[in-house]
Image (tube, rainbow, N blue to C red):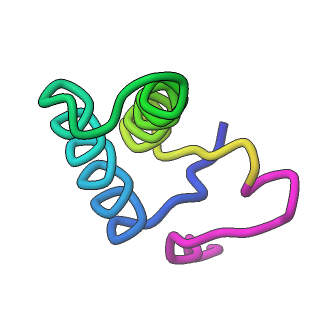
Amino acid sequence: MKKNMGIADRVIRTLLAIIVTVLFFTNVISGILGTVLLIVAGVFLLTSFVSFCPLYSIFGLRTCPMEKAD
């Protein structure tokens, strides 16, 4: 897997995941919507840690800088 996520994208996803998690555990969001958002937050965290987003590769997107070719 090649990296396809830049630092800003990773930070934004991590912050969103933290916010959703806090809102879920303080019962601001609950029910099915809360559960779905918590799962999405988990996916955001996972993709942030590995710097790879499968949807980006499907659509040919990259938010990380291009590597220099020798």
Q: Position of residue 38 (x, y in %)?
A: 41, 28
Q: Which residues are magenta?
A: 56-70
| Residue 12 vertical position relative to residue 52 in the rendered view, above or below | below
Q: How many marks?
A: 0
Q: In which quadrant of the rendered image does the C terminus lie?
A: bottom right
Residue at image position (57%, 44%) is 52
Residue at the spot 45% in from the left edge and 41% down from the top edge: 44
Q: Is residue 2 left or right of residue 9?
A: right
Seen from the viewer's position, the closer of residues 67 and 21 is: 21
Where does residue 12 sit, x and y in percent of width and height? 33, 63
Where on the picture, by quarter, is residue 13? bottom left
Q: Does the magenta segment cover residue 58?
A: yes
Residue name at image x 34 percent, y 65 percent: 7
Q: Nearer the viewer, residue 28 or 57?
A: 28
Q: Residue at x 51, y 32 (%)?
A: 43
Residue 42 screen position, x and y as percent: 42, 28
**Percent coordinates x, y for residue 39 in the rendering:** 49, 25
Residue 23 in magenta?
no
- Height in image: 55 above or below 43? below
Q: Position of 15 compared to 32: left or right?
A: left
- Assign the magenta stretch its main secondary structure: loop
